[in-house]
Structures are given as C-alpha cells and as structure tokens.
Image (tube, helix red, strand yellow):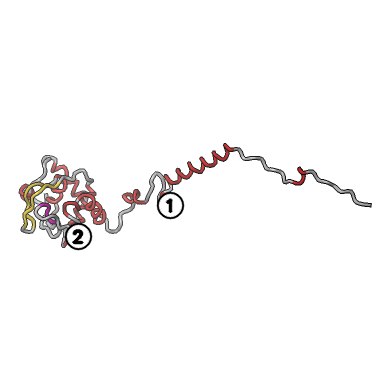
Amino acid sequence: MSQPQHHSSPAAESPEQGAAIPIWLIVFTVMLLYVGALYFDDRGGWFHPQVYGPYNSFAELEPYQPKSDGGLFNQGKAVYAKTCVACHQASGLGTPGQFPPLAGSEWVNEVEPGRMIRAVLNGLQGSIKVEGHDFNNVMVPWNSLSDEDIGAVITFVRQNKEWGNKASAVTPAQVQAIRPKVKSHPAAFTADELLKISPAD
C-alpha cells in the first residue's frame, strides 16, 4: 500500500518575506549620518587628543598653552616673526640704507632699554646712525601690542646671541612704566630725541 503523498503549498515552500523598510527611514538615517559627520568635523579637533570644540586645531590653542622654558624669548621670537621680520629681516641685519640692523646694534645693547621701548611704542622716523652707517626710513608704532608682547619681542632681540646681542631681558612691567610717559609725544620719535632721553627713564 503506497504512502499518501503530501503536497506542500507554494506559500509554505518560500521563506517568509520581511516587511519592507520605509523609504523615509532610509532618508532619515542618511541625513542623520550626514549631520553627524558635519558636527564631528566641526568639533572634532581633527582628531587631536588635546583639542575640543569650539577649536578646530591645535594651532588655535597654541597661544593659550603654558609658556616653554624659553619664556619671553620664545614668545618674542613669534612676535618678531609677525611684526618685525619684514623690515629688519630674519637675520636681524635690516635693509641697507633703510632699516637698521638689530644684530650687534648699540641701540639694542644699551644697558637700559628705555629708548628701545619708546621706539617700539611710538615708532621711529628720520635719520639714525647704527654701527657707523646711516639709515633713513619710518618705523611704525607698535603700541597696539600688549606690554607682554612688547617686552617679549625686545627681549628676543636683546638676548639673541646668534645676532651678537647679550643685553638684559625686558619685562612687561618695564614697558608698562614707560607707556604713560610717551602719551605726551604722540608722534614717532627721532634718533636725536631719543638720545636726549636717559635710557634709564
């Protein structure tokens, strides 16, 4: 006696079809990933472990980092690169006939920095003799810089041994003490005017 044959229905043979994913869910997921990528890119600090929003890179945080052992000298080196290098050159040798050298300059290496601070604060104009050579141009005033930045850049110049300078550092307090003294002289100084002022004043 033959066994009865059981015929399964087509519905039983095919696997059950899953529910279709709504198109809005796909669009929403893609948009969510896109917005997340933008947010991370904007606030991720380019994956630097010490950078957090609202900063985008370590370079933006550099001014707020603790000063290195070089202190004012290293800070002044950065200020010099931004404000002074175009005229006095990276070598500190200046431009012949126009901008005097800072390397080995008797004006830079004075025991007291009062004249140099005044020149940086108010600027310098007219003829000046440095190391026996004449220069004639205009140095713009840098009184918009902070006392710390001015002290730092003068310290960098005065203590730059590669330039042959070995003078003392200049503190922000020294700049702060001279700043009110130059308010009565709003124009740029001339070399003759500076020579009449004691460098200690």
In-front residue for pair 5/19: 5
Residue type at numbered disc 2:
Asn
Q: Is residue 3 left or right of residue 146?
A: right
Contact check, label 1 and label 2, Cβ < 8 Å: no
Query: Which residue in the structure is indicated by mark 2?
Result: 160
Residue drawn where x is 11% and y is 44% of the image: 188
Vertical placement of residue 9 versus 1, above or below: above
User: What predominant SS class does the magenta segment belong to?
Assistant: loop
Element type where label 1 sits in the image: helix
Q: Nearer the viewer, residue 120 or 71?
A: 120
The residue to which callout 1 is attached is 47
Query: Of helix, strand and loop, which one carries label 2?
Result: loop
Residues shaded magenta = 98-102
Residue 197 showing in the rendered view: no
Residue 72 percent across, percent down from the top left: 25, 54
Alpha-carbon span between mark 1 and mark 2: 37 Å
Three-letter code for the amino acid on which mark 1 is drawn? Phe
44 or 119, nearer to the observer: 44
Horizontal side of 45 relative to 1 (left or right) equals left
Q: Name the disc covering residue 136, or none.
A: none
Residue 100 is one of the magenta-drawn residues: yes
Q: Position of residue 3 (x, y in %)?
A: 90, 51
The single residue placed furthest to the top in the displayed view is 24
